[in-house]
Structure formats: C-alpha cells, structure tokens
Image (spheres, rainbow, N blue to C red):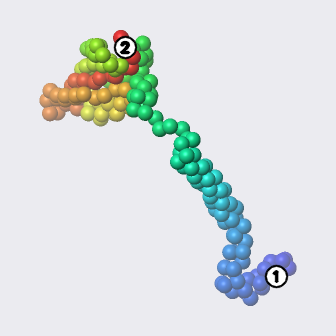
Amino acid sequence: MSTAAIAAKHFLRRAGWAGILGLAILLGSPIFYATTVLPMQEQLASLKVAQLQLRRDIVKNQRGEGKPAPTGEMQLKAFYGQLPSLNRSDECLAKIYAAAERQHIVLETGAYRLAGAETGNIQRFQITLPIKGSHVQIRHFLSEILTEVPALSLDDVNFKRETIDLTLVNAVIKMTLYLGGPA
C-alpha cells in the first residue's frame, strides 16, 4: 500500500462521517454553483432587463408615446390574413390526403362545394368524405388534419358499423375549410 493511500485512510478515520460530509460539500460546492447558481443569476439578469423594458413601455404608453393598441379592424385584417386563399386550397386538400395515407385510410370519393358569401371576406369550402377504417385510425386522422390545417373545422362525423364483430367502421366526415379573400 502506498503512503498516499495510508495517509488518506488515516485522514478518513480521524475525520469521521462529519469530516467526510464536510469535505464532500466543500468539493461539491463549485459544481453546484456552476450548474445551478450561475444559470439562475443569468436568468434573473435577463428578467430584470425585461422588467425594465416593460416599465419603460408602461411609462411611454401613459404619456401616449407607445404603439397604439390594435383596432378591431386591424385585428380582423390580421385574422383574414391567416386564412389560406382560394388558390391555396389544393395545398390544404393535399395535407388531408397525406394524413389519410399515413393512417392507411383510403379516400375513394368525396363531395366538395365552394360556398362563398356575396359579401365578406370568408369563403367556405365544404368537404364531405366517406371513409372506412378502424375507430382509432379515424380518430387519429381527424386529430392530424385539424392540427395540420388550422382553417379547417369539423362539422359532423357519422359512424356506422355493419355488424358488431367487424373492426372496421364506415364514417362520413363533413368539414369546412375557411378561405380568405373574395372569389
């Protein structure tokens, strides 16, 4: 046994559990500081900067120097701007077909009808799809298309099972794709 090992063993015996714990805390403190305290200090500094900026914005708004709040007309225009246009409806349909393919659902037929209002900026593209698949496949398909195409609304779903022992169900899905802009 080397002299260093003998010295370490002697030190540990003399220090006891309290000394060992104290040494562990002493050696672990820099690691704790570097991994916990420093990142928290940086986060605190960035929050203080954000707080200062918000206070400046409040003072500017009280003086009337800040940006004006968006009007209802501006908000409505921004809403219309987020809707896909009529010439992008095929991209939305492609997302629906791709989601059906991923869920192994075959879309053989479908009824499509454009129902635009004479006035206003929103047109409705009504979609009716008869599909066949398991309950889980259809549920995942609906979840996926509503996530992928935010301008799509689910209007109606009808399920029909031919016999109780079949795992596949027939469903008719009615959806509306909201499109922005005039026809």
Q: Quadrant of residue 140?
A: top left
Question: Which one is in front, 122 or 7?
Answer: 122
Q: Is residue 59 above or below residue 6?
A: above
Residue 17, image x, y percentages: 66, 84
Secondary structure under the numbered disc 2 in the rendered image: loop
> Between disc 2 and disc 1, whose residue precedes?
1
Q: Is residue 147 above or below residue 85?
A: below
What is the crowding at mark 2: few (fewer than 14 residues within 10 Å), some, or many (at least 20)? some
Residue 27, image x, y percentages: 73, 71
Disc 1 target residue = 7
Residue furthest out toward the top = 183
Q: Are marks 2 and 1 in contact (CB under 8 Å)?
A: no
Residue 172, image x, y percentages: 22, 24
Q: Is residue 75 above or below residue 112?
A: below
Kindly identify the residue that appears in the image at 54 percent across and 38 percent down: 67
Quarter containing the N terminus? bottom right
Kindly identify the residue that appears in the image at 80 percent across and 77 percent down: 5
Q: CA distance from mark 2 to mark 1?
A: 88 Å
Question: Which one is in front, 118 or 72?
Answer: 72
Q: Is residue 39 visible?
A: no
Kind of residue at disc 1: Ala
Q: Is residue 136 visible?
A: yes
Q: Quadrant of residue 181?
A: top left
Question: Which one is in front, 61 or 145?
Answer: 61
What is the crowding at mark 1: few (fewer than 14 residues within 10 Å), some, or many (at least 20)? few
- Asked whether, in this view, residue 11 is left or right of residue 48, the answer is right
Kind of residue at disc 2: Pro
Secondary structure under the numbered disc 1 in the rendered image: helix
Disc 2 target residue = 182
